[in-house]
Image (tube, grey):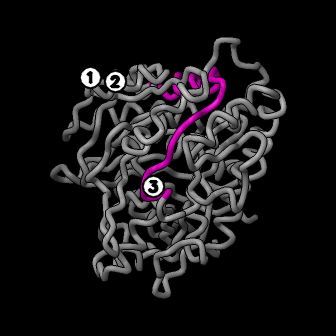
Amino acid sequence: MTRKRIVVMGFMGGCPIAGVIWQHIHYIVGLQRLGHEVYYVEDSARYVYNAVTHAENMDYAYAVEVLGRLAGQFGFEERWSFCARFAEGHPTAGMPLAAVRELYRTADAILNVCGAQELNDDLLASRNLIYVESDPGVEQIRWDKGDFERRAYLGRHRALFTFGENIGTEHFPVPLHGARWLPTRQPVVTDFWRTDAPPARDAVFTTVANWNTSGRKDIEWRGGKYLWSKSLEFLKFVEAPAKAGETFEMAAAIRDPETVALFKRNGWRLIAPESMSADWDEYRAYLRESKGEFTVAKDQYVRLNTGWFSDRTACYLAAGRPAIVQETGFTRLFGGDKGLLAFSTLEDIPGQVRAVNADYTAHSRAAFELAAEFFEATKVLRDLLERAGV
């Protein structure tokens, strides 16, 4: 593959929580390993979030500090920029705005990761924008409902990719009206996660979750309301550890005392997520020290049968940690057996836990092999660039 100049755009400075950070780092490092000249740019009018103080405002000092540390750790020093479009004069840290504008004009590809980047006049100088959708279902429904503003936004991209691998097939119910959505997966640099050490004897199934985000991307379609929050899905399966006879652990900020009590009565151990959310290496250690992952998926992903799969779960797999996760239609393509089991009902779960416990070594090996085959960053990103015509 010819060396290309590629820009990754996202929000790991503006929202510097560990899961978001790793999602972007896998793109940057995966593209570097393919031999490309890789830059990371944030150029947003959104206020920024501080993962230590939990404040959201115009103070972007923490965002810049985080990006500087990440650049040093992952090898993109001198190739990053943070432009505060929300502030007068658009102050910029890292590469100056003039260099960013030149980069927009000359880049062979600009990846709009998670579709988080707003379009501005500088960025529209590029004809090489590539949209990478992380939340399948929402944009397709907006398009079907005649949201011309979103159609215009998406139309500024030369290619549209989605983590919803069933989109555009008979397995997905929303019509596409001629839009060409290309399936992709969330890339993972597997050697960042791989460990040959088995988990401790007292390790349990864990997960990390943003507890309640409903309202932000909830959407109505054809008489139904499709929710973006995971909280209601977790409540549907709150009895899972009790039914399985195991302790499950969740790192999530659940504020309601009655809900906390309900989870604890059913065998859940709840821990505060703040420390690992602010420290991407601590987050990685938490996944690697777990027995495996047990988690649900968002209502939208499940009921629309999108085929979506979590990058966090892929990280568990890369660590050799088996996963038991809610079905979204992904087993049509991979998983569903050793290393990665999918449930649709509460009754599915106890048997899956027993299966993992009965031959943990085989499930652990299969978990890593799944990650290496289906999510390895260089494979995923080489395929994405080729189909985008880069």
Depth-wise, is mark 2 or mark 3 nearer the camera? 2
Give coordinates of residue 296: x percent, y percent. Answer: 51, 43
Q: Quadrant of the C terminus?
A: bottom right
- Element class at badge 2: helix
Q: Amino acid at mark 1?
A: Pro
Q: Is residue 125 visible?
A: no
Q: Which residue is mark 3?
A: 9
Q: Quadrant of residue 221?
A: bottom left
Q: Quadrant of residue 98?
A: bottom left
| Label total for image | 3
**Residue at horizontal 49 percent and vertical 82 percent from the top:** 179
- Say few, some or many: other residues with alpha carbon within 10 Å of mark 3 (under 14 / 14 to 19 / 20 or more): many
Q: Does the segment drawn in magenta span residue 162?
A: no
Which residue matches tag 2? Answer: 260
In the picture shown, does residue 71 fall above or below 39?
A: above
Answer few, some or many: residues within 10 Å of disc 1's Cα (few below 14, many 20 plus, some between 14 and 19): few
Give the structural element (helix, strand or loop) at label 1: helix
Q: Is residue 54 above or below residue 22?
A: above
Front position in the image: 111 or 282: 282
Q: Quarter of the image containing the N terminus?
A: bottom right
What residue is drawn where x is 29% and y is 78%?
Answer: 147
Find the distance from the CA under tag 2 to the CA under tag 1: 5 Å
Give the residue type at disc 2: Val
Amino acid type assigned to the residue bearing label 3 in the image: Met
Residue numbers of the magenta segment: 279-302
Question: How many angstroms separate mark 2 from mark 3 (CA)?
Answer: 37 Å
> In the figure, 120 relative to 357: above or below?
below
Residue 272: give x, y in percent of width and height. 39, 21
- The residue that label 1 is drawn on is 257
- Please say if 381 is above or below 63: below
Depth check: give the residue in front, 45 or 138.
138
